[in-house]
Image (spheres, rainbow, N blue to C red):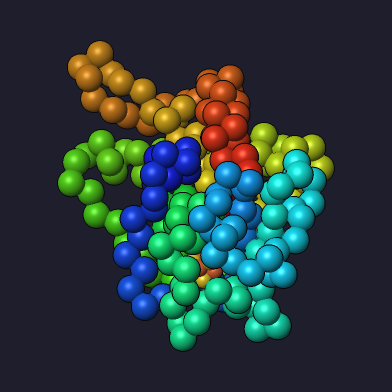
Amino acid sequence: MEAALRGQGVAEVPCGSCSACCTASQFVHIGPDEEEALAAIPAELLFPAPLSPPGHVLLGYDERGHCPMLRDGRCSIYDRRPRACRTYDCRVFAAADVGLDGDGEIAGRARGWRFSFSADEDAVRERAVRAAAVYLRDRPELVAGDGAVLDATRHAVASVAAHSAFVRRTREGALVLARPDPEDVRRLLQLASDASRGSGRA
Ligand code: SF4
């Protein structure tokens, strides 16, 4: 999940037959470097992305809230789908324990995820993600800026991105929860912001 959020990989989500994120009235951001996706999507479905440099566009949705590239319940351009779709991972809501109380399809799907851990450290990291979510809930300006509303997606993604500030190694080498250094949190959030700029759903 961290690699995908950094733009260094594809989210390996076992979606099965679920297409909730393609039918949730979301705008899909496409950067100018995404030549294959841009070639696969009819130009009339794209429009300039607000507050973004020239060349960044959004793919909208139809009157039902469905992505127009969704055909018969499947992505018709799956191999050439935008980066935002390749990196989208609804498990982030369950990992951070945020955004699960909505009645949308994504919230419903996200509520169903259960995690198991092959190593004790992974369980500590999950608790660190949730600790980060609580910390950021009380300091939304760190993610959304002064006066802006912290939406569930940004909150959950930021919690994963910042979680390593909430763990430390003991002298014996064990990973344990720790009180975060605010500068560490800011640094990790900035790194995540830099990596994800220009790719996402809104
Ligand atoms: S481009 Fe494909 S994966 Fe992305 S939202 Fe549309 S149907 Fe879903």
Q: Position of residue 31 (x, y in %)?
A: 62, 48
| Looking at the image, residue 132 lies above or below residue 65 | above
Q: Position of residue 189 (x, y in %)?
A: 57, 32
Q: Position of residue 111 (x, y in %)?
A: 44, 68
Along the horizontal axis of the image, is 190 left or right of 45?
Answer: left
Q: Which residue: 29% across, 43% down?
A: 123
Along the horizontal axis of the image, is 45 left or right of 195?
Answer: right
Q: Which residue: 46% across, 27% down?
A: 165
| Looking at the image, residue 46 lies above or below residue 118 | below
Q: Position of residue 91 (x, y in %)?
A: 42, 58
Give the farthest residue toward the top. 171
Along the horizontal axis of the image, is 103 left or right of 172?
Answer: right
Give the farthest residue toward the left. 118
Identify which residue, 138 or 26, lies in the foreground. 26
Q: Which residue: 70% across, 55% down?
A: 57
| Looking at the image, residue 68 lies above or below residue 32 | below
Number of numbered discs visible in the structure rendering: 0
Can see residue 60? no
Can see residue 61? yes
Q: Which quarter of the picture shows residue 187? A: top right
Identify which residue, 12 or 57, lies in the foreground. 57
| Looking at the image, residue 149 lies above or below residue 114 | above
Q: Which residue: 28% across, 41% down?
A: 122
Quadrant position of the C terminus in the picture: bottom right
Give the farthest residue toward the front. 39
